[in-house]
Structures are given as C-alpha cells and as structure tokens.
C-alpha cells in the first residue's frame, strides 16, 4: 500500500468502515488488516479488480490518515473524533437505528445529541466523497450509518449518479414512525437515484414510509416527492426507484478456499479435537441480539435435558465474534449468553465430553471455512437479519454434499434458500423439532437439499449482485444535472 496524491474517480464507494483497520504494534509499526463484518466481506471481492475510491472510517478515533492505494483501489479515510465514535457510531447508528431496523428486539434509544452527531458525520462523509468523485461519477453509498449522504451529496453535486444499498432490514412504517427524525431520514435517502434493499418487503416498507411520512406518491417501484419549501436538507422535488437486490458471497472464491488442502486438513484436526463426535452442531455469529443465539441455546439446553442429544455423540460449537462491546445491550447479551453456556455445561458436560464449546473470539477466513466443513448441522437462527452471509458460506463450503442448514424465516437468506430446514426461532418446540429433523433425516434427502442450496448461491453470487445493483442504478429514472461550478 502506498500513499498517493489527490485524484478523482468515476466510481466511489462510501461505507462506514474502510475495508481495512489500522493496527499499531508496541514498536509503532503500522499494519492494515481486513476489517470485520458482512459488508466488507461482500464488497472486498467486488471491488478487487475495479479502479475506484472507497471512502470510510479507518476504525480508530482521531485525525484521518492520508489517502493510500491498495491495488487499484484508493482508500480515502474519514476522520472521526472520540465524540463522533460515541454519539454517531455507538449511539445513533448502533443504539438507535440498529434496534429500530431490527424489529425493536431491544428498545431503541433516542437522543437529540446523537442525531446531531449523525448529521455532522454524514456531512464529513459527504465532503470526502465530493472531493474524490469525478464529474458525472457513480457513487454507491452503503448502509444505515450513511442515510443522509445521498441528499447532502445531491445538494452539493447534482452531476453525480447516487445509489444507496441497505445491508440490514428496512422496518415497517409502524415501527419506523417512532423515529423522531423520520422525515429528515427519508429526505436524506431520497437524494439517491436508486435504493437497493435485501428483500422485496424491505423495499415495500421504504416506499410505504415515503408515502405515509412524506406524503410522496408511489407508483410501482418509483417514488415521486414534490419537495418542501423549507430550505432544509433534500428540499428539492425528487424521483427515485427502490428495489430488492439480495446480496451474496464470492461463491467460487469461498469454495476454492474451503477445498484447499490446508483447510481440509484443519477440518479433520478440528473434528478430532472435538473427540470425533457423530454430529457437530455449529453456530457462527457476531455476538448480536439480532442473531438469536439465546433462543438457539435454549433449544439445545432442552434437547440435552430431554435426552434427545448428548455429548460425546453430539456436540455444539458456538463462535460468537466480539462486536460493539461498548454498547450496553451487547454487554448485557454477552453476560446472559455466558451464564447460559456455563449452566448448560455444568449440567450436561462430563469430563472430556463438552456439551457446548463457546468461543468468544475472532478467526481467520481459513479457520471459519474449516469449521463450516466440520459442521453436520449449521444453526442460523436470527430473530431478524438483512441477509445472513454465514448461511451462504456454509452451503458453499460443504462442497462434499454433506451437512444440513437450519435457517430462520426472519433472515433475508430464507427468501432464496427455501430448501433449508426453515424455522421460527421464537417457537422453541418447533426449533427443537427442526434441529432433530436436520440431524436425523435421510442422508440422501439432505444431500438433495444441500445441492439445491449450493446451486442457488453459485448462480446468485456477489458479482451478480453488484452488477444488478449498478445496472439498476444506471437505469434509475433521474437524469444527472450538469455539474454546478463551485
Ligand atoms: C450485515 C447484515 C448482511 C463472522 N465472524 C468472523 C467472520 N465472520 C464473517 C462471516 C460473514 C460475515 O462476517 C458476517 O456476515 P453476516 O451476513 O452473517 O452478518 P452481519 O455482520 O450482521 O452483516 C447482514 C450483511 O451485512 C451483508 O449485507 O447479510 O444481514 O446484518 O462473512 O463469515 N469472519 C472471520 N472471522 C470471524 O471471527 N474471518
């Protein structure tokens, strides 16, 4: 990676995080490592071969480092102060919008000072994008942290073609209406020409929100807003299109990784270290209340108590990657999960035979692929999830045809992955039954289900997703204006 001078680009990505995080060793050496999370995993492979700029936060508070290049990609850091991190990132993004957009699984917190920080930081991102975007460039804004950027950018640079993709669900208007700043948020989004969502229901929720909150008119997938005469953000009249473009994974790349000799050997090693059980159940999630880890543990605990499963024949491995540890709701969740795991192991493990292997750690991609290969049954049980890439990675890694996927109906992935063992994680009795079916069903039937799931992911991979998004953006109704002289 080399640092480089000012230049403009025809394609600009704006996302909360850069695809890399800075880490400084005790001797002061700076290294950059791939940053965690679904967005980066997906976008990294899409952006790999493109000449473009990526605007995002470098993952630490303070002044932004200079822009630098990673292959063809110009990385353009945005500086966030410690207060921005607390109020914009941990506050408004992760303690207001995240719970509100995930069915209020925990109550969202509304603070006016967080909203001010959200506006302020969205302005910072807008400044950075405006600086690197060439005349008439395409700008692809990502996710719930940057919902005001489309309108802020359009006010500044009407020459740009602006798209926005939401990685998480978009809530029904009955929930969205709670947000004290609901109208400004929609005005922010309407700065985009095309708005992409994971599921058709998310796009519909957005369109209904525009109608009910702004009084906009909606015909099919096109929303027309007459504007407001108040001189505030995004006041001009707007026409935009909204549609579903479900995200996916780099299926070929992940299959190759999972098939590599190192990963296969590691999978054998992991299975042996677990005591060669007959059935390995696996969960892999960021430690987040949306992921349904507590419901999953409840089902496992009852199955153990019922004598339906028992170590050493059956063992459950839960990887819970550390996440948002300074947000109260996440700290509480961690305590609850760890108390439950402790109780289950106290009651059902024997010396040398562990009922639940709980790992609150982060691993490399190879280790994740090896774990997927080991899993006879993968448990993906979110209470709400935009898509869930883990489900897609799992079926891709089990290229040998084995395995079974238990998948919550409340994930975006369930729209496409109909051959999975679908479940409602709130229904513990139903969840237990589904897990047992996934363990005990005829192997030939399971192979057919897995083959169909794998085909689906291979045909709709992340490249197809990116092309579909950019094509829809290109065809969106708005005509770009001539660039204003600044
Ligand atoms: C958001 C939306 C949507 C997890 N732990 C480790 C690790 N991971 C990887 C997984 C997967 C990714 O992180 C997680 O993606 P998910 O889709 O499961 O979930 P979110 O992070 O919540 O992502 C989600 C996604 O954006 C994309 O639009 O699907 O609905 O919430 O790739 O494998 N990777 C490594 N070590 C870990 O410990 N290397």
Image (cartoon, grey):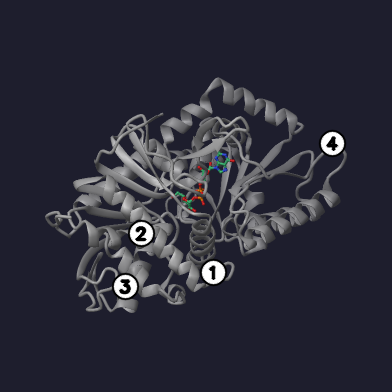
**Quarter the C terminus occupies:** bottom left
State which tag comes first along the sequence, 1 or 3.
1
Q: Residue 352 — which label?
A: 4
Foreground label between 4 and 1? 1
| Vertical placement of residue 77 versus 103, above or below | above
Q: Nearer the viewer, residue 215 or 10?
A: 10
Q: Secondary structure at mark 2?
A: helix
Q: Nearer the viewer, residue 129 or 314?
A: 129
| Vertical placement of residue 177 versus 428, above or below | below
Residue 260 as seen in the image, left or right of residue 363: left
Residue at disc 4, CB closer than 8 Å to ligand 1: no
Number of residues whose C-alpha sits closer than 10 Å to that of mark 3, classed few (under 14), some (14–19) or many (20 or more)? many
- What residue is drawn where x is 42% and y is 42%? 42
Residue at disc 2, CB closer than 8 Å to ligand 1: no
Distance from Cα at disc 4 to Cα at disc 1:
41 Å
Q: Secondary structure at mark 1?
A: loop
Q: Position of residue 197 (x, y in %)?
A: 36, 57
* Residue 130 visible (yes or no): yes
Q: Residue 104 — which label?
A: 1
Number of residues whose C-alpha sits closer than 10 Å to that of mark 1, classed few (under 14), some (14–19) or many (20 or more)? some
State which tag comes first along the sequence, 1 or 2.
1
State which tag comes first along the sequence, 4 or 1.
1
Residue 346 as seen in the image, left or right of residue 283: right
């Amino acid at each position: 990676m080399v640092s480089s001078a000012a230049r403009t680009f025809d394609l600009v990505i704006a996302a909360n995080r850069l695809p890399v995080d800075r880490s400084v060793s005790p001797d002061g050496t700076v290294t950059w490592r791939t940053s965690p999370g679904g967005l980066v995993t997906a976008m990294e492979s899409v952006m790999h071969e493109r000449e473009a700029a990526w605007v995002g936060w470098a993952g630490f508070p303070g002044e932004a480092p200079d822009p630098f290049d990673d292959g063809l990609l110009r990385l353009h850091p945005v500086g966030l102060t410690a207060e921005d991190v607390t109020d914009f990132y941990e506050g408004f993004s992760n303690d207001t919008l995240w719970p509100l957009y995930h069915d209020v699984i925990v109550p969202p917190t509304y603070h006016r000072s967080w909203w001010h920080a959200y506006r302020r930081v969205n302005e910072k991102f807008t400044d950075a994008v405006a600086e690197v975007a060439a005349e008439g460039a395409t700008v692809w804004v990502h996710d719930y942290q940057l919902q005001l950027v489309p309108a802020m950018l359009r006010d500044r640079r009407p020459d740009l073609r602006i798209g926005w993709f939401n990685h998480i669900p978009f809530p029904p208007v009955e929930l969205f209406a709670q947000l004290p700043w609901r109208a400004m948020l929609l005005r922010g989004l309407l700065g985009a020409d095309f708005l992409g969502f994971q599921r058709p229901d998310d796009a519909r929720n957005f369109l209904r929100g525009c109608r009910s909150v702004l009084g906009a008119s909606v015909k099919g997938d096109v929303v027309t807003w007459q504007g407001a005469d108040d001189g505030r953000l995004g006041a001009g009249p707007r026409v935009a299109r909204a549609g579903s473009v479900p995200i996916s994974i780099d299926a070929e790349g992940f299959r190759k990784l999972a098939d590599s000799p190192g990963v296969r050997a590691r999978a054998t090693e992991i299975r042996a270290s677990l005591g060669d059980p007959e059935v390995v159940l696996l969960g892999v999630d960021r430690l987040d209340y949306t992921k349904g880890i507590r419901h999953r543990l409840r089902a496992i605990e009852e199955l153990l108590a019922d004598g339906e499963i028992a170590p050493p024949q059956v063992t459950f491995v839960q990887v819970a990657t550390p996440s948002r540890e300074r947000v109260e709701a996440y700290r509480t969740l961690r305590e609850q999960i760890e108390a439950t795991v402790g109780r289950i192991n106290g009651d059902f493990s024997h010396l040398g035979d562990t009922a639940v292997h709980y790992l609150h750690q982060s691993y490399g991609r190879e280790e994740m692929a090896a774990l997927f290969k080991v899993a006879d049954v993968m448990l993906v049980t979110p209470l709400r999830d935009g898509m869930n890439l883990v489900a897609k990675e799992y079926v891709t890694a089990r290229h040998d045809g084995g395995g079974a996927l238990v998948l919550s109906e409340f994930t975006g992935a369930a729209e496409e992955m109909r051959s999975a063992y679908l479940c409602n994680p709130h229904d513990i009795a139903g969840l237990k039954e589904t897990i047992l079916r996934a363990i005990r069903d005829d192997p030939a039937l399971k192979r057919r289900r897995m083959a169909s799931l794998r085909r689906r992911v291979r045909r709709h991979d992340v490249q197809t997703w990116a092309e579909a998004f950019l094509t829809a953006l290109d065809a969106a109704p708005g005509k770009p204006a001539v660039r204003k002289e600044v």
